């Protein structure tokens, strides 16, 4: 007897009793049917004249998820186009880079009264006001750093240490002092000031802008040599916040050098030369990040020197036994056009030199 669901004649010969399993693989689920490109008309629809047996299904009807994907792509494209448009047409102007002020400098020779004292360097220092000064870079002391309204403690410390680096390289380094390469000093300057720095060494002029001695201390190696003793230094560094974007460091230092004639190296032929340098360093946030500074002002008092000495390229000390008798500053002609040579001179007080033994 045929089983339930079997044909009346029983299962065809050669077909396994599980015939249902043979067609199970071609049974289509609902999603497959909906995705078909062709759809069969119903019996009522096929009764109409010239009715086709099947009809095509529109792609949108077959792909609801595809419609959502396309809509999302279009939305993203519109948003991207709007962002580009607003980026081009936004009402805010790009901030202009902060301009760097050029260096303004002055170098004032201090002429001695009488002959310049000479002797051994250690004895000269003991008998001078520099007896208690520190030696070398130790004399450029950095105070404790405190945050300001717009700058952190670490930024203030960066400004102080960069200013110290500049002072050490420009006024203590023996190579720079004796007319050697100045590249190490140049590297500390803001790139916008380096052109002015280069002009000051290629063509030094006493015009308040392009004197090499406005940037650093140095002596002509054909005339002067450093004695074998460290530079004596004393001074202060002070931080001021000029604006929310700018820090300034004011430096006021005295450097005292033991010098001797370039071709005489006897221990008893030294003399002292004093340079007081007041400087203002400026730092914006880029300078602090890059370990740069802007040297905006430098005022130098240096002696013993003759008033008539040309100090635009080198400081020109009067050495032991020399004097500035009959020396007087040259005049400045206010009617001269172009660059004006600044002619200033002072008198070196007797107490500023070593006491004569």
Image (spheres, grey):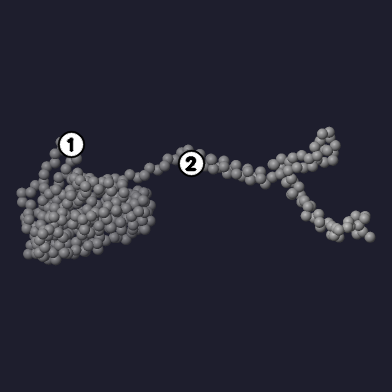
* Alpha carbons under labels 1 and 2: distance apart: 50 Å
The quarter of the displayed image where residue 166 is located:
bottom left
In this view, the residue in front, 195 or 319, is: 195
Q: Residue at x 12, y 52 (%)?
A: 305
Where is mark 1, residue-wise?
A: 337
The image position of residue 257, as x and y in percent, is 16, 59
Q: Residue at x 32, y 51 (%)?
A: 283
Q: Residue at x 71, y 42 (%)?
A: 61
Where is mark 2, residue-wise?
A: 87
Rendered position, 192 above or below 3: above
**Residue 269 appearing in the image:** yes
Q: Secondary structure at mark 2?
A: helix
* Identity of the residue furthest to the top in this view: 49
Dot 1 alpha-carbon crowd within 10 angstroms: few under 14, some 14 to 19, many 20 or more: few
* Identity of the residue furthest to the front in this view: 14
The image position of residue 149, as x and y in percent, is 37, 53
């Amino acid at each position: 007897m045929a089983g339930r669901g079997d044909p009346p004649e029983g299962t065809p010969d050669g077909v396994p009793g599980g015939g249902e399993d043979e067609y199970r693989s071609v049974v289509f689920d609902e999603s497959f049917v909906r995705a078909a490109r062709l759809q069969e008309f119903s019996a009522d629809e096929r009764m109409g004249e010239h009715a086709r047996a099947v009809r095509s299904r529109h792609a949108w009807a077959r792909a609801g998820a595809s419609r959502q994907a396309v809509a999302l792509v279009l939305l993203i494209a519109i948003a991207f186009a709007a962002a580009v448009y607003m980026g081009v047409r936004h009402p805010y102007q790009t901030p202009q880079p902060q301009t760097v002020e050029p260096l303004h400098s002055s170098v004032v020779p201090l002429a001695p009264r009488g002959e310049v004292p000479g002797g051994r360097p250690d004895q000269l220092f003991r008998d001078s006001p520099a007896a208690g000064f520190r030696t070398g870079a130790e004399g450029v002391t950095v105070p404790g750093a405190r945050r300001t309204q717009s700058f952190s403690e670490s930024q203030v410390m960066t400004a102080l240490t960069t200013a110290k680096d500049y002072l050490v390289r420009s006024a203590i380094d023996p190579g720079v002092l004796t007319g050697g390469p100045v590249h190490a000093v140049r590297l500390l300057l803001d790139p916008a000031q380096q052109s002015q720095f280069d002009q000051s060494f290629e063509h030094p002029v006493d015009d308040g802008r392009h004197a090499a001695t406005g940037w650093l201390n140095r002596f002509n190696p054909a005339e002067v040599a450093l004695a074998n003793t460290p530079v004596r230094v004393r001074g202060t560094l002070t931080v001021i916040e000029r604006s929310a974007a700018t820090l300034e460091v004011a430096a006021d230092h005295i450097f005292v050098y033991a010098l001797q004639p370039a071709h005489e190296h006897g221990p008893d032929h030294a003399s002292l030369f004093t340079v007081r340098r007041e400087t203002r360093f400026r730092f914006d946030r880029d300078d602090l990040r890059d370990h740069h500074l802007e040297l905006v002002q430098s005022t130098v008092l240096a002696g013993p020197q003759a008033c008539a000495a040309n100090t635009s390229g080198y400081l020109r000390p009067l050495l032991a036994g020399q004097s500035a008798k009959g020396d007087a500053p040259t005049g400045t002609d206010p009617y001269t056009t172009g660059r004006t040579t600044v002619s200033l001179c002072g008198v070196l007080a007797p107490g500023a030199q070593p006491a004569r033994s």
